[in-house]
Amino acid sequence: ACKSTVNGATRGDICNCLVNSILGQWNYDKELLDADEDILATINSGKKEENNELGSGLGNPVFDEEGSVVSAEAFTMNYFLADRLEIIGNREQDPINDAWEGDVFLKIAASVPTSYPTLKVDYFAARSFGDEFGTAITGDLALVNISYVMAFLFLGATMGRMLCGTGSRWTMALAALVTVLLSTAAGFGISSLIGLFFGPVHSLLPFILLGIGVDDAFVIVNAFNRERKGTKRSSESNTALATRTARSLARAGASITVTSATDLVAFAISSSSALPALASFCGFASICIAFLWFFAATFFSGCMVLDERRQRDNRRECLCCLTRKKEIDDEKDVFEEDFLSRYFRNYHAPAILSKTGKLLVLTIFAALFGYGVYGSINLPVEDTERAFIPADSYLQDWIQSSDEYFPDGGIELYFVFENGTDIYNAREEIASFGWRLKGLSNAPPYIAEPTLEGNVMAGYWNYLQK
């Protein structure tokens, strides 16, 4: 894998690899491995300390009384690439290493035959989690289209009459979706302009904005309908319609402002998170919500006035330039409370305000609150990384194998020292760094026994001792 060329970069450019594996006992030479008549003897040919270090790369190893490796169920091979991070568009990126991992390493690892009865290869690269998580999120984009279609049908059926005609509002259902799309486009553009990066999880924002936008649309339409109570639509002038719009926004504007401000503040506070992905997502969300409030109070409200004029003039829904032949029946075209409004007014409110209702509400609330506190106290803190990965991903196999063969592995920790002069001046401390971390696996801070492979100073020290 290291002998390949990617984007014009040769082996020396990409992978002057530091390879950490038990195969280093044969210098990664297949001919030496094939010619070895006693593999265990070669593995155990070093000092006891070196054998313990090799054991860290073996899965479920078994040692004899002398500390020699007797058997193992798995082994690891790690490739360490030189860091070539670049600042591209205010983001740290490593295009050369990313390309090598995707075009070379992952392709070769995926091409290993699975027909061997005693050999199974599981693999992982630095870009794997981002690739798999991003693919899962991108795959959910089809649900965004479905949700918008469902929202359109729901809005059209509930904001007005379901059948096209007097009182129907299918064009307003479309206007509500356009309001959400406008706020999404404006929010994404401004967020990118100020330097917030776009990640896979940001694709979920249209779901959030759709829910908030639909709620705002219902509030405005409901207030608009209530202000027409007792007024015949056919006799309403443009001036009277403008007055009704002002009264409607006085009622609905305060509601959507409070709800939007609450959501905006919540996301804005979260945008200060130390996690870059979370901070960027919340920053995008807060800006998009601000635009959603703006377009709901301007664009959608303006469309509402135009739609009222269309209905007053008895024009058709989509072909608004055409007038219906059937005249408006003012006796039937009056405001009526819908089923939900009648339910909450006539049944729900009286029920919960009665003595029995109050007692029942307080009892249920107290039980839910107590159960919530109990659940919060017993909330487990677990590694949920695999919960973000599709069930059929190769990463799930790698994580499962890591749990099975390397249950004591934990999170790998590497120390990288830079600046040659400082390294030389601290050569003795660096050489003994690993030895000073030994013996901490059974007590806090529970650091597994360190491996010194890759520590040049430790290797040089061992060489001098020989």
Image (tube, grey):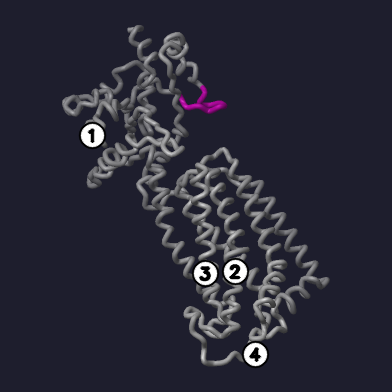
Of tags 1 and 4, which is closer to the observer?
A: 4
First of labels 1, 4 by sequence position: 1
Mark 1 burial class by Cα count in 10 Å: few <14, some 14-19, many 20+: some
Which residue is more in the foreground, 436 or 289? 289
Please state if 133 lies on the left or on the right of 220 as rendered.
Answer: left
Question: Is residue 198 rendered magenta in the image?
Answer: no
SS assignment at label 3:
helix
First of labels 3, 4 by sequence position: 3
Of tags 2 and 3, which is closer to the observer?
A: 2
Q: How far apart are marks 3 and 1 (CA)?
A: 50 Å
Residue 62 x %, y %: 37, 29
Q: What residue type is labelled 2?
A: Gly
First of labels 3, 1 by sequence position: 1
Mark 3 burial class by Cα count in 10 Å: few <14, some 14-19, many 20+: some
State the extent of the magenta-drawn residues as a range: 440-449
Q: Which residue is drawn at 58% across and 67% down?
A: 300
The residue that mark 4 highlights is: 330
Vertical placement of residue 361 versus 107, above or below: below
Residue 408 at least partly seen = yes
Q: Distance between the residues labelled 2 and 1?
A: 59 Å
